[in-house]
Image: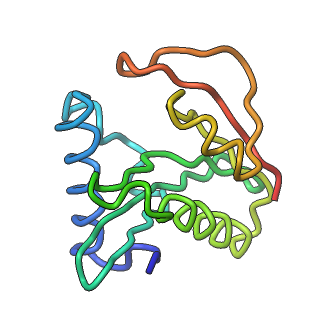
Amino acid sequence: MFQIAKNETMLEDCFEIRKCVFVEEQGVPLENEFDQYEDYSFHIVGYINGVSMATARIRPLNTHVCKIERVAIIKCYRGLGYGKKLIHAIETIAKKHQYNELTMNAQLQARDFYLKLGYSPFGKVFLEENIKHISMNKFL
């Protein structure tokens, strides 16, 4: 279901999901959605019956820590357990690549979701793209 994007088509699927969720739904400017980290991050994409429905980006920060970013699920697939499966897939990929800590800037509305998956908040709530966020991490 979830895998690392292995070719341009899969990468474009990731980017289209991000445009749909962040740019169209949440109003993030398109020029802010894509950045200098795209080329050296792992891009994860999920498919159901050949249709792309979820994505996330894993960005290495150093040899032990990577950052979960750009977690997005197409609206009609939310609330069906795919978010949990996506995070578990990210954790599996991170462990496979010898990372032992994951960090993220989670949207505040998703904090309880990540708490249930073992992530711990730290620091203060802050705005990113006019959306409230909280930093969170988990040791693997």
* Whole-percent x, y for residue 113 in the image: 60, 44
* Whole-percent x, y for residue 11 in the image: 29, 67
Q: Residue at x 69, y 71 (%)?
A: 97
Q: Is residue 55 above or below residue 136?
A: below
**Toward which corner of the image does residue 112 lie, by quadrant?**
top right
Q: How many marks?
A: 0
Q: Residue at x 29, y 37 (%)?
A: 33
Q: Quadrant of the N terminus?
A: bottom left
* Whole-percent x, y for residue 139 in the image: 82, 52
Q: Nearer the viewer, residue 99 or 79?
A: 79
Q: Residue reaching furthest front? A: 79
Q: Quadrant of the C terminus?
A: bottom right
Is residue 110 left or right of 123 when viewed as pictured?
Answer: left
Q: Is residue 40 above or below residue 8?
A: above
* Whole-percent x, y for residue 6 in the image: 37, 79
Q: Nearer the viewer, residue 42 or 121?
A: 121
Q: Is residue 72 above or below residue 89?
A: above
Is residue 33 left or right of 83 when viewed as pictured?
Answer: left
Q: Nearer the viewer, residue 80 or 102?
A: 80
